[in-house]
Amino acid sequence: MALTPQFHEAVRILDAFSDKDRLLLEGLCMKIRASEAALTDAAAPLLKRCIFSCQGLCCRNVTPESLIHMMDFVFILALDRSLEKTVSSCLKNENALYTSDCIFLKDGTGPCIFPDDLRPQVCITAFCGKDHSVGKEIARVKKAFVRMEWFIRIRKLKTLGKWIQHSLSDRSFRV
Ligand code: SF4
Ligand code: SF4
């Protein structure tokens, strides 16, 4: 699925949250952020290889919609809403045919517009080769994302339940 509608969906979800839910969500996102920071530290030697040997090859031959999803936007925007404008402007290049580089490389060349501890899940957890030296840290990031994703799904179900209840009570009132 294209990224632009997923981004709009993330914004819509965040805007619909009550203050209480937003605080709970921020708590979960802070846990993802802490686990991403720990992974970045532990993966420093691997990341050196990405930067100095490959010069960020993995950000240059990608279709971003295969890496980035709605929940990544929720996580990022929940902790830094100021990125909304930047992301939105990058998304204008989503359908450009002239590049295979990731649209989230700053000014088209890099680095990534997202801070090291505020990265989409796949971007931060995918390393080439079978390197298990950061296996635990990767698992922590994934677990923290799963918690946040469940929180969002349950909130969506509750909202749907309330809407159905409301519609039914409206109808019975009319009858
Ligand atoms: S993950 Fe591997 S292929 Fe990708 S940039 Fe890093 S070293 Fe290069
Ligand atoms: S979002 Fe950032 S880290 Fe992920 S592929 Fe794009 S430039 Fe690379």
Image (cartoon, rainbow, N blue to C red):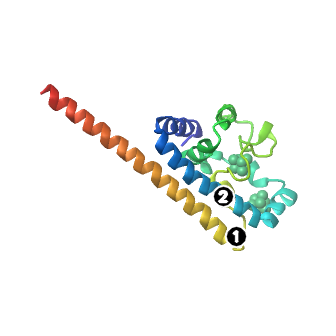
Quadrant housing residue 87: top right
Mark 2 residue element:
helix
Q: Which residue matches tag 2?
A: 34
State the separation of the CA atoms marked 2 and 1: 15 Å
Residue 146 at least partly seen: yes
- The residue depicted at 84 percent of the width and 56 percent of the height is 51
Q: How many marks?
A: 2
State the quadrant of the C terminus.
Answer: top left
- In the displayed structure, would residue 58 be above or below residue 96? below
Q: Viewed as shown, does residue 159 lie left or right of 76?
A: left
The residue located at (50%, 58%) in the rendering is 147
| Mark sitting earlier along the chain (2/1) | 2
- The quadrant the N terminus occupies is top right
| Secondary structure category for the residue under label 1 | loop
Question: On residue 12, which mark appears?
Answer: none
Question: With respect to residue 160, does 29 lie above or below?
Answer: below
Taking 126 as reference, is 25 above or below it? above
Q: Residue furthest top?
A: 174
Residue 53 drawn at (x, y percent): 86, 60
Which residue matches tag 1? Answer: 134
Which quarter holds ligand 1? bottom right
* Residue in view at x 68 percent, y 31 percent: 89
Nearest the viewer among 13 and 6 is 13
* Residue 9 image position (x, y, % from top left): 51, 38
Residue 35 located left or right of residue 153: right
Q: Amino acid at mark 1?
A: Val
Across and down, in percent, residue 61 comes to 73, 50
Q: Amino acid at mark 2?
A: Ala
User: Residue 54's spot in the image, x, y percent?
Assistant: 83, 57
